[in-house]
Amino acid sequence: MSTSTTGAKRLGSSSGNPLIRAEGIWKIFGKNADRVIGTADAELSRAELRTKTGCVAAVRNVSFEVWPGEVFVVMGLSGSGKSTLVRTLIRLIEPTAGRVEIDGHDVTQASRDELLQLRRHTSSMVFQHFGLLAHRSVIDNVAFGLEVQGKSKAERLARAGEVLKLVGLEDAANQFPNELSGGMQQRVGLARAFAVDPKVMLYDEPFSALDPLIRRDMQDEVIRLQHETGKTMVFITHDLPEALRLGDRIAIMRDGRVVQLGTPEDLVGSPADDYVSNFVRDIPRSHVLTLRWIMREPAAGEADGPTLDVSTTVRNAVPVIAASERPVCAVENGRVVGVVDKEAVLMAIAGEGD
Amino acid sequence: MAVAGAAAQSLPSSLPAPWWRGRPGAAVLVVAGMLLSYFGWKHHWAWPAALEWNSFSPHLDRFQAWLSNNRNLPHPNIAFRIFNGFANFLDDLVSWLTRLFYYLKWSGTTALGTLVVLRFGGRKAALGTLAAFASFATLGLWDNSVQTFALMFAAVGMSLAVGMPLGVLAGRSATFNRAITPILDAMQIVPAFAYLMPVVILFSVGPGAAVVTTMIYAVPPAIRITALGIRGVAPNTVEAATALGATRWQVLSKVQLPLARRMLLLSVNQTILFALSMVVIAGLIGGTGLGDAVTNGLYTDPAFAIFAGAAIVIMAIALDRATEAMANRTDPAQRHLTAHKAHVLRAYTAACALVVVAAVVLGHVFGAGTVWSRWTAQDWLRTYVQRALDYIQNPGTFLFRNLTNPTGNFLVQHGIQPLRTFFIETPWPATFAGLVLIAFLLSGLRRAAIAAAMLFIVGLVGEWANAMDTFSQVLVATVLTVIVGLAIGVWAAESRTVSRVVRPVNDVLQTLPQLVYIIPFIYLMPVSGVPGVVASVLYASPVMIRLVQRGIEDVSPESVEAATSFGATRAQVLLKVKIPLARDAIMLGVNQAIIMVLAVVVIGGLVGSGALGYEVAQGLQRNAFGQGVIASIAILALGIALDRVTQGRGAAGARSES
Amino acid sequence: MRGRKLAAVAGVLAVGAAAVLVVGSAGARSKASCGTVTLNEQAWAGSTANTYVAKAVLEGMGCKVKITQIAEIPVYQALANGKTDAVLEDWQHVDQYKQYISKQHTVVAGGPNGVVGHIGWYIPTYLMKAHPEFATWKGLKGKESLFKSPESGSQGMFLGGDPSYVQKDAQLIQALGLNFKFVSVGAEPAQVARWSQLYKQKKAVIFYWYTPQYLNTEYQLSEVKLPPRFKGCQDDAKSGGNVKQYKCAYDNTIIEKVFSKKFAGGGSPAYPVLKRFSWSNQDQEIVAKWIAGDHMNPDKAGKKWVAANKAKVNKWLGK
């Protein structure tokens, strides 16, 4: 499969070790939950497990790695276990089994103190319902993380002011959360997470409570911030377009398991099963697939047509390919890596809707 | 998941099955079985003596004597000295507060109370406080009121000092909450008469003992509401703080406590109201003020008792409104205190303090009395109240002859009497099994098991017959409460005018000492359990009314709109949408009504209801400690059994989910 | 800012605590000469009468008098701790005598207060006139249904007394084989409300009643004679047992005074005066009627009686 090669390709900036490594994460709610793992019961479907033991398996044997600078999206419908999964990463929910490592530290074995340090300095989280403190002004909310760290008042207010400017809320500093619109509240949530300058940003469906237009603005905001700051992000969503838009790689969860993990192109181009293909059915393939996905080895003498970057989406390549008599060359780092002809484009577009 | 589970549970009842197939049908069958056994074997099966533990009572009596003998030694051991020290501390606290108010003079006391409320609660609440002071003066009860207020202040302060930390714990730990809940239930259901004597032996008499007695009753709401407030803080804010690396202490001090502040202040409010409802009992053991004015007035001067009762109500309502206003106005989540505002408020505080000082100084300069004693309307009011009392005491009036006496007789002959006979004379195994089965049908296996255990305890302590007598009266009172509560609650929810009228009436009924409002009913109703039933209904209805009203008002407007869009009339909307959707609130109301009815059983015992209430009252008044405790245990067991029976399956499901 | 607030709170607390300490130590007052005497007033008119007459006398000697209002049983603990000095009307709480007087020696008997209590079964005089046979309990036999009410069903209704009073009526009814249902109507005011209502309607009513009671001057009541007393006959059914041991009339009750040991041994000049305090049923009923019937201020009523009864008062004062 091309998954690993394309995936790795996009992580050109990765330097050596992953920033987050999750191995075999389980979360089962209920009495004696830990006894389920390792038995045949663990393989039962959720409903069967619930009737048999009364336990609910939220996350089942999930493993993944997130590389520095990457935007890693976990996508699934409600109840798929995605929000539980992200909470196990910093042990807001204790995983029943499995191991999490962040920035080289073993989170699952961390002492209370180490965990506090991790939460204070390494990671930061943005929540679906914002989780703002209603009794504090905007700037005090943003400064909260620093306050918890024990920073002086002057220091934390200065930093909070900077971050507020970054999210464009400097004028609202002295207002209170309930005076702000939902979108603005979530900007405060973002600013609060950024204020502590974490290595990892965790987003738990941050925009699903917002109107579509505002949601789009906020996505732009995240993309912009990611570009400006280069943070590593784990992003939970139930919205496929959002996942495709933001994610370098996407894990699709269903009933607590990861059913497919790959780049947007992988998901759209070769869904792992019916569940995933149902999901991506309505996504216009030409908007997601790039030339890399549909190119073929150039035959002799074909490599002289017009050139396009290999990461150009099919949609954007259509005018050039249509206007050209010859197959178009896909170029990566100035080198031709493949050619794309009209037939391939038509096939890719025709593949939509099946 | 929880939703799916609840849906699955409610599914069978929504199927069009014939009524006799469902749970109500089964319950009717059970009752029919009990009736059958009543007609077949009445009188034949009293609770067997072999299943009674008779030596419990003398053990308790001996324990009390032991306690008294050891405590009154010339040199009691350290434990008793600690109790003594605590009692002395409380005595001093109360007398210090009283003297403080005396020192402030009536002018300073008024200024202090009014301006504190003005500063933190706003103009309207302050006006109410001022009016309360004016009415204490008018009633000629200034001194009593000041004494009661000092007692309240100490009792509420101590209750909060104990209750709030425990409430925080209970709010944060589900285990701890589960562990203390039954203890809190017991503290609220067991009648004060039962533990008055041990309290007196340990803490002697006087304000200290009165404070302790009040605390036993007022600490539970402080704990419960505090816990509720802590738990009510949106979990996502707690999670957000945790995710940022806040320690447990930081989460508590920076997130949970500030956000729960409004609820915490409401718990102060409720603690005050609960404490005030104990002043009459406190009066029996040396708490001075309005409480003993009520108890002694009842014997020698009922009009005076009514005045004292009115003063208690006024104090309660004024304190309720003032603390509520303060809770709302100072809520940091609403107030949005900026530096500028804070500055203005500080100046305001200083101004208020200045006025208070001025009032004190002026009071001293012009020789104002420590208490207001110049002009009162007591004698003028007394003529009217006495005239009203004379009217209701006159058996020749239309009111008595044609209204209250026949109504009362009807209730006795067709409600209380037959039910009592039924429950007492039905063979106990039939009653026992029947009640447990009904518990099972309504509330599931676990609750049925608890109900069975409680009923067995009732029999074991030898109170089966008395408990069945009390139970029959509780049943009548509950049914009446539910009817009254539903009718008025629905009406109040539908009409703002009614709602506005009902609220102060509810407040009065909840805070007026029962011994006071029962006075007219003693005269107006026939000799029977009816006055006791009336007292229970009056005491329990406000809660039922409030819960029904809130339940109906909380029905989502969308549902109502949807029904209206299909052309439903107002009555249809009410019957088919609002009431069914408010079912949980209504069931909670029924449950609470039963508990509150049980809480006034002892008062019923003092005015002719007999049974358990009478035994408890005698326990204190005739020095029959064991008997009083045993009857109290029976009341408690009955209360727990009835509570579990009426909690219903819905609650059971919801609890096991969470 | 926060620090300052905290300091302010701590300051207030410290001042409060200091004040409590100061007041507390001031509270430990010494009993010089007469000082303050604390009398306990019980919740009935007769006791109010005793207490305020005694108060008037003691104040005449220059004592300060404080009045507590503590229920009958708990007041023994108050006497034991010296929180109350004297109870001037105690209706024979034998259990308490055993425990506090004989065993603990924390309370001392103060001798009778002169009033003799009598408990019995009473009916309105108009009823007695209509049914002379009701003069003894035997006349009630077979005529119980005359007293029936909705509450008692087919039986006659017997109105029992305040739960705190000595009584054995349920047992008596059973021992005498009468077809009465014993109905407790609760505390004294409730009981009075009950029978007085039936009295006003000129209906038949029979109830537990006693002298002295100021209402006896207002209502015409007659006593139903119960079987004579015999050796070992009991009056207080609290202890239970065979009903036969209760089958006799109530004994007359000598009303006692009880004092705190601390007060009795403390050398207060008030003690001998209270010890000599003694008056008659009539005296008490008059003062009680002034207070409860005519709503006279108790202080005034006490002074009025003292002024009108110099001879008796002087005897108490030892003059």
Image: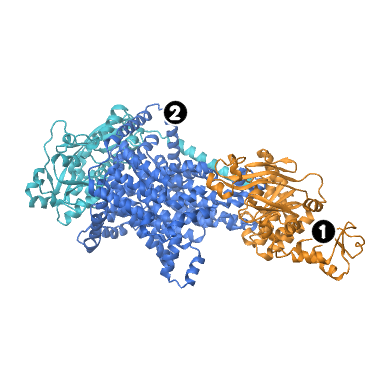
Chain colours: A orange, B blue, C cyan
Could you say which is closer to the camera, residue A50 or residue C87?
A: A50
Q: Nearer the viewer, residue A57 or B107?
A: A57
Q: Chain of mark 2?
A: B
Spot the residue most to the front. Answer: A300
Helix, strand or loop at mark 2: helix
List the single residue furthest toward the bottom. B567
Image spot of residue B591 (x, y percent): 40, 52
Quadrant assignment for the C terminus of chain C: top left
Task: Identify the amino acid type marked 2.
Answer: Ile
- What's the residue type where badge 1 is placed? Arg
Q: Is residue C126 above or below residue C283?
A: below
Vertical order, B274 against B461 (above or below): below
Specify the quadrant of the image occupied by residue A319.
bottom right
Q: Quadrant of residue C57?
A: top left
Instruction: State if disc 2 and disc 1 touch (CB < 8 Å).
Output: no
Labels 1, 2: front one: 1
Q: Is residue B305 visible?
A: no
Label 2: which residue? B78
x then y, percent, for residue B274: 42, 49
Question: Residue B20: horizontal and vertical position, in percent?
Answer: 35, 57
Marks 1 and 2 share the same chain:
no
Q: Nearer the viewer, residue C287 or B445?
A: B445
Query: How far across and down, in percent of the image, does residue A77 sit?
Result: 63, 56
Residue at image mark 1: A292
